[in-house]
Image (tube, rainbow, N blue to C red):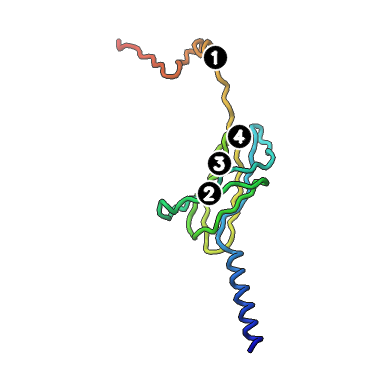
Amino acid sequence: MKCKLHQAGTLLVIAVFSTACTAARIVGKTTLMDEKGMALPPTPGVTVNFINLGAALEYSLASVQTDVKGNYASAVLPPGNYTVEAMYPGFVIERATVVVKKHGKRKTPFILKKIREGSSRSVNEAQEENIPNPGEVKIKPPR
């Protein structure tokens, strides 16, 4: 009798832990790229949002930040369709659509590219090229 109880307890423990290990999550790594397309060192603090497209508005968004190696893992998520977006100041926001099932991890890596900074022009250069100042409108009278 004790042997059967011990076996039943062992099976219960295995079942509980196997369910916890395969809970539905979205995991991945973010990589930041410079203007030349070269990978930058892993950066902590990249924000990753998980937007449940089928949930009520107040339950539709969860967020995490990447660790020092650029890795992230969502909390346990209910099954459904998600838009996952990664963002970091100065970099283009990247998005992916992920279908989450009842169990298992979905790997979704992101590569964020640096936003290129445009060259600014002086007021004299802008006037020479007939570029109006911000807020300035040139309206010609009708003929």
3D distance between C-alphas at marks 2 and 3: 11 Å
Amino acid residing under circle 2: Ser
Label annotation for residue 73: none
Amino acid residing under circle 1: Ser
Secondary structure at numbered mark 2: strand
Amino acid residing under circle 4: Lys
Q: Which residue is mark 1?
A: 122
Callout in the foreground (2, 3): 2
Callout in the foreground (4, 3): 3
Amino acid residing under circle 3: Met
3D distance between C-alphas at marks 1 and 3: 32 Å
Callout in the foreground (2, 4): 2
Q: Residue at x 60, y 54 (%)?
A: 107
- Which badge, 2 or 3, is on the more N-terminal residue? 2
Image location of residue 106, percent across then percent down: 58, 56
Q: Which residue is mark 3?
A: 87
Q: Which residue is mark 2?
A: 63
Image location of residue 92, percent across then percent down: 56, 37
Instruction: Give residue 56's quadrant in the image.
Output: bottom left
Number of residues whose C-alpha sits closer than 10 Å to that of mark 1, classed few (under 14), some (14–19) or many (20 or more): few
- Which badge, 2 or 4, is on the more N-terminal residue? 2
The quadrant the N terminus occupies is: bottom right
Q: Which residue is mark 4?
A: 114
